[in-house]
């Protein structure tokens, strides 16, 4: 009994680790739920349709919940990151990561417009609604926050001598920026799949960062 008490981390450390754990869970939850819908919902084409369109239709609530859950888990990870970072580095990276998480919550609340024939029967193009405009705006702000967070943390990792994480952060920032630029151009096919790969890379990066600070928490 004495040994168990002695080896149990202090409560603040346990809280920090619990928060960082959400940074590991957010990506798999988002990707698994999104991919399951993309492969099973009638009329959805992975090479053509953005996952935001899944929030429309009879089962759209699943993707709305997916956006909100992943966004809240990202915010929790950002809070854990702030607690784990050394003094003097607790502002920008957690703030930017929180901005990305909150933008995902907003993207779930304000749905993208049904276009490109999804759900089945939707027009190819149409007038952008107020909630569709907010969805696009929040997405752009959130993606910008994520890209900036990658480079801010890359600088910190480089100073610490963590070269692997520094390069992973830089590469993630560049890959996501390129993927976002491609999808924003309005092209489909390879561009849509490339953006999906960029999203998966970003989630893997968040998990790696969260694991690093989880292990370092003391």
Image (spheres, rainbow, N blue to C red):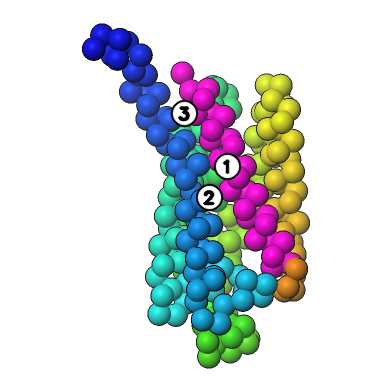
Q: Position of residue 135 (x, y in %)?
A: 54, 68
Q: Can residue 157 be seen by looking at this rendering?
A: yes
Q: Position of residue 194 (x, y in %)?
A: 72, 61
Q: Of label 2 and label 3, which has the lower sequence position?
A: 2
Numbered label tally: 3
Which element is circle 2 on? Answer: helix
148 left or right of 122 in image: right
Q: CA distance from mark 2 to mark 1?
A: 8 Å
Quarter of the picture holding the N terminus = top left
Q: Nearer the viewer, mark 1 or mark 3?
A: 1
User: Closest to the observer: 116 or 47?
Assistant: 47
Secondary structure character of the magenta stretch overall: helix
Q: Of label 2 and label 1, which has the lower sequence position?
A: 2
Give the extent of the magenta segment: 191-218
Disc 2: which residue: 27
33 left or right of 170 in image: left
Classify 148 as above or below 57: above
């Amino acid at each position: 009994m004495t040994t168990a008490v002695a080896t149990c981390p202090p409560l603040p450390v346990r809280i920090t680790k619990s928060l960082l754990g959400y940074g590991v869970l957010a990506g798999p939850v988002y990707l698994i739920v999104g991919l399951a819908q993309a492969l099973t919902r009638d009329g959805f084409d992975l090479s053509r349709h953005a996952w935001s369109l899944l929030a429309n239709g009879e089962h759209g609530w699943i993707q709305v919940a997916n956006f909100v859950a992943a966004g809240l888990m990202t915010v929790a990870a950002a809070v854990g990151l702030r607690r784990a970072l050394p003094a003097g580095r607790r502002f920008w990276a957690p703030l930017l990561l929180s901005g990305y998480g909150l933008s995902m919550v907003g993207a779930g609340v304000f749905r993208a417009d049904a276009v490109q024939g999804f759900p089945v029967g939707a027009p190819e193009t149409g007038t952008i609604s107020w909630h569709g405009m907010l969805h696009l705006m929040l997405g752009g702000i959130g993606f910008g926050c994520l890209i900036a967070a990658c480079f801010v943390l890359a600088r910190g990792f480089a100073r610490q001598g963590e070269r692997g994480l520094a390069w992973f952060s830089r590469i993630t920032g560049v890959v996501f920026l390129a993927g976002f630029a491609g999808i924003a151009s309005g092209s489909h096919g390879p561009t849509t799949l490339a953006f999906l790969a960029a999203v998966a890379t970003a989630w893997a990066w968040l998990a790696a960062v969260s694991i690093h600070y989880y292990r370092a928490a003391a």
